[in-house]
Amino acid sequence: MAKENTEEQDVLSLVAGGRPKGRMLFAALAVGSAVLLILVGGQTEPGAEGGGWWNEPRNGPIFALSLMFVFSVLAAIFAAPAEGPAAKRLTVIALLVSAGFLAAIWLMGLIGYGLSVLAFCALCAAIAGFRGRRLAAVAAGLALAMLVLFRFVLGLWFPKAALFKLAPWLETLGRFL
Amino acid sequence: MLENLSVAIDQVLAVPVLAALAGGSLLGIIMGAIPGLGPGVAIAILLPVTFSLDPLSGITLLMGVYAGAWYGGAIPAILVNTPGTGVSVLTTYDGYPMTRAGEPQRALSLAYASSFFGGTFSVLVLIVAAPLLAAFAKKFGSADMAMAAALAMVLVITAHRGAELAAAATLCLGLFLGTIGLEGAYGSPRYTFGTTWLLGGIPLISIILGLFAMSQGFLLISKSGDKAVPVEMKRRLLGGFAEVLRYPKTLLRSSSFGVAMGILPGVGEFLAQFFSYSTARRGSKTPELFGKGAPEGIIASEAANNAVPAAALVPLLALGIPGEVLTAMMLAVFTVHNVDPGPALFAENGPFVSGLYLSLFLMNFVIVGILLFATRWIALVTRIDDRLLGIAILCFAMAGSYSANFRLTDPLIAAAFGLLGLALKRADIPLVPIILGLVLGPIFETRMRQAIGGNGGDLSVFIERPISLTLLTVMALLIGGSIIGRLRRRWA
């Protein structure tokens, strides 16, 4: 019986969320919601006179932000602190990849989709720990796969890059990249 | 409905729908079989693609991924003791011991057979229940619809046992995000900070890609490349289809749990699996075998899981209210194609609904066919380096977020939500309520305005209407129960 109860608890732990961590995250959400609540006057316009209180445009944000503030404060009080060295390493990786992600999209207007994806894959592969020939193979292989899938199989259109406007032969090349 | 059957057959036999059926099922199985991915990531990536398809092909593709992933998740759970999707956790309890005992094909076969039973059972329930609920929903006024949306939100919060406050906070974040942009009553901007790109609201695609795909990409990219080597598959997998019939009670009860939990918003596969597994063990003649390779354990887990996807469509089709994140994503496909799910759907789009039923029914046969034929090759995908998957997911997110509007702001939003999603995942804070708040918020706000405005600003409309009052009472009981349960846990 005791063993069955232990197993029951074990199974229950799979569906029970447990005590969430991230006290600072909830605190940030609480502060964010408070700031946004203060801004409600400037970020919404009043409804027409006689239009009814229920139609006021600010009702929705006030309702959502007030509840978000209350629940975030309560969640911050009851949550456990998070963050450790591993989480910090992951955050740095995520920030680097995000910066590369946005830079690659910005570069699409200059060098086209194919070359941007190649650069992004090379950056990600390097961050993921691939080196030397494996890095080159991973970047080129994945970029080629994405190019084939999006440009040729799905026929996704991307704006013409500045590089391919420089010369007629580059324009031909640009149709494939 | 029968008069629409011939039209439905024509629709489903069209090349785009068949391609979506087969492609979605195969992709779902593969995504389910790769630990760490699952249908959320796949659907987030595919969502922009479905906008260019017709509604039936788009929904079929997404449902194929959804259902296929639950089937595929059993493969690594049974072969390498690593659940492919979160909902396959309990399958490892009995599936892996069976593999260690030298019977991996028996375990897989049992899993496929019970999944097939659960899947087809839930489609039959959908066919019967959705029109009934839709017919009943015709009696729903704006007050009732507002309370139905509110009840869905309360259910989502209370379903996150032990993390209700976190779920409530993230749901409210979703509610707020849903208010950004031009509002409905006066067309005035809210929280756009003077920009034009926020006038249309924060794009759902960018949020979904960021929260589900990019955050997972970040996690995978930082992993090591070591993977378990799966067991080699040699023998045929048909035996389980006869074996499951020896446990008809477990099969039917587990499928019913899946259907019931699928219909209830916010509850989903985890609770279905838990109730199903616990009940099967209590009712078993050999409870001591559970956790050591009991066939009933696999049946309970897999039948319950796979009964959820079709059942989850019941509230979406009948009320227009998505109960969980994957059907919330499907609502976006309906919206893009100007198909309004809800009571009128069955009268106005009968052939579409019949076509959807038929494609969902066929889907289970297609998935089982693929699995019986190709399990040994599909099992190999569990060996793909996580880091390669991470980079590929980020590339998909790049194309998906940029190609929607070809502006840098959408990928910027996706990246921001990717970082937020990562932080929330690391802290075990649920992501799903954000999407449900975002999708249910505008429905709730519009219906509240209509209900209160139609009653001259008087809030008594919510207690004067029987349906609304019933829903309010259920909400009060749920919230009260959740608070009492939380206090009890603290005092225990």
Image (cartoon, rainbow, N blue to C red):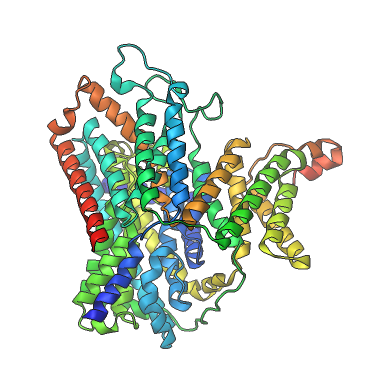
Left or right: residue B470 compared with residue B27:
left
Q: Nearer the viewer, residue B472 or A112?
A: B472
Viewport quadrant of the C terminus of chain B: bottom left
Left or right: residue B87 compared with residue A124:
left
Q: Is residue B274 visible?
A: yes
Q: Is residue B20 visible?
A: no
Residue at horizontal 26%, vertical 55%? B486
Q: Nearer the viewer, residue B214 or A69?
A: A69
Left or right: residue A130 compared with residue B120:
right
Q: Nearer the viewer, residue B441 or A176?
A: B441
Left or right: residue B33 compared with residue A48:
right
Residue farthest to the bottom? B101
| Above or below for A99 versus B251 | above
**In the rendering, at what x and y percent does residue B425 appear?**
47, 56
Q: Nearer the viewer, residue B227 or A69?
A: A69
**In the rendering, at what x and y percent does residue B277 appear?**
28, 71
**In the rendering, at what x and y percent does residue B354 appear?**
32, 48
Residue at horizontal 49%, vertical 67%? B33
Residue farthest to the top? A49
**In the rendering, at what x and y percent does residue A171 appear?**
81, 39
Q: Quadrant of residue B401?
A: top right
| Above or below for B95 versus A91 | below
Q: How many marks?
A: 0
Residue at horizontal 63%, vertical 57%? B391
